[in-house]
Image: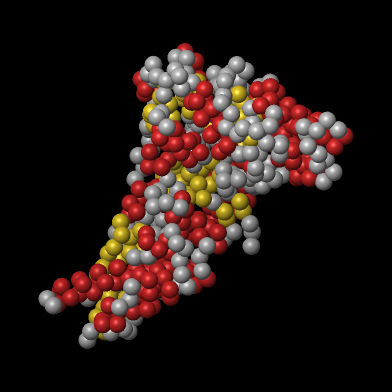
Amino acid sequence: MNKIYFDHNATTPIIDEVFEAVVPYLKDQWGNPSSIHWAGRGPKKALEEAREKVCKLLNCAPLELIFTCSGTEGANHAIKGLAYAKKDRGNHIITTKVEHPAVLNTCKHLSKEGFDVTYLDVDPDGMIDLEELKKSITPKTVLITVMFANNETGVIFPIKEIGDIAKERGVAFHTDAVQAAGKVPIDVQDLNVDVLTISGHKLYAPKGVGALFVRRGVRLVPLIHGGHQERNRRGGTENVPGIVALGKACEVAVRDMDKETAHLKALKERLEKGISEKVPHIKINGHPDKRLPNTANISFEFVEGESLLLNLDMKGIAASSGSACTSGSLEPSHVLVSMGITHELSHGSVRFSLGKSNTMEEVEYLIEVMPPIVERMRSMSPLYAGIK
Amino acid sequence: MYSEKVMDHFSNPRNVGEIEDASGTGTVGNPACGDIMKLTIKIENDKITDVKFKTFGCGAAIATSSMVTELVKGKELSEADKISNQTVAEALDGLPPVKMHCSNLAADALHAAIEDYKKKQGK
């Protein structure tokens, strides 16, 4: 059976170039980069080379980059670190209703510690209203945290405009760029972003590594206290193989971005068009233009997402869903529900997130197998009766 | 995460459809929760002679619907009364814990259908 992976927003495979770059650091170069002796020198050099490569992806300086162990750690560090550093000035945080749980639950935690959190609404396209953002800022607002791109719909937020507003009003700004990094250009020199989070395993590096851009002069209370690593900003012996991998992955992302974007866009457009033509009663979720090149989120009326995923899996296709059954809770996707999409349609959503290795043949295969799957599930659905 | 039996009933569901002149109909769940089951039964001489289902829901919802139809077909009403959601889950070699309450409604649909039948009979 063909194995087709359309779930790159969940995690990406490790590409060969990254794998090969890492092997020496799992084998011979095992030293501690903090050691001054021979064993530490190679890893230390690799660490700093990797840092420069990640900096190139974001266009920042090496001193502005902290390595972390995940996107979730980065978001926690950024949000708690900024909130704690500014708590003498105010206790108000602004975010959106559609953030990743790493951001939402960190904000929720801070509200237990006395912070007030405003969760901005999104419109049916999944976009926030900048006027609402402006109106939400009070003299007590110390932090705005808005994702660069949404993991479920791929909607890209107006980060430059948000940064300008934050700067003008003297509010710190963090963006969770985990889904955007490597897929769309990010230039922190052009964006008034104070802190930005990325994660390795969304851009073809392994799990367990991420990075945080912290603009020079921005104070962040450390999350992980320990040794002097990362200039006292993040304790813990560095994950050298992971960091080397992240560096290589960022180097590849910079090198291949234009080519990849064109490739992904062509596949996504074909996928959405093909499904739209062949399957009635569907809805493509998210802003028509301001979306990542790789993400297609489609709601299939009258059927439930998990049962579609199980059927796709039987055909070798891996995707994910906004249905409650795949979220581990009883609620369907908070992102789709916030967009005003009904619970039924949210339960029936499937996210196809494409990546480097996907081909047009794979997309055509999906377009071929999807209609009978949906038809079969609809024929079993009590909601579908009479619609035909 | 699902047992082989669940996947078997999900891939080849038994007794899908609706009985046109059903003796009783039971509908449980709601689309907002992601699961609706509609069960129609045919009852003759206090015996369930035919049963069909239609379900909107996840793998567990479809498999439990299918399983309950197999369990009750040909059964006396008194026996069918004894079937619980737990019985259905066990017949499928268990369900993941998260599915036990939300997607395991098939026996409820059965009891609702039997209730409907009894009401129609004026019993």
Image point 47% across, 63% down: which residue? B96
Instruction: Looking at the picture, tell me which residue is in the foreground, A112 or B38.
Output: A112
Q: Residue at x 51, y 60 (%)?
A: A310
Residue B63, placed above or below residue A255: below
Q: Position of residue B53 (x, y in %)?
A: 34, 69
Residue A37 place in picture, x, y as percent: 86, 33
Q: Position of residue A66 (x, y in %)?
A: 65, 29
Residue in the image at 63% along x and 57% along y: A3
In-image side of A12 versus A114 (left or right): right
Q: Position of residue A263 (x, y in %)?
A: 63, 39
User: Is residue A124 placed above or below A62 in the rendered structure?
Assistant: below
Q: Is residue A251 left or right of residue A330?
A: right
Please say which color scheme the image uses: secondary structure
> Looking at the image, can residue B51 be seen?
yes
Q: In this view, which residue lies farthest toward the left? A: B122
Quarter of the picture holding the N terminus of chain A:
bottom right
Q: Does residue A226 appear to the left or right of B118 in the view shown?
A: right
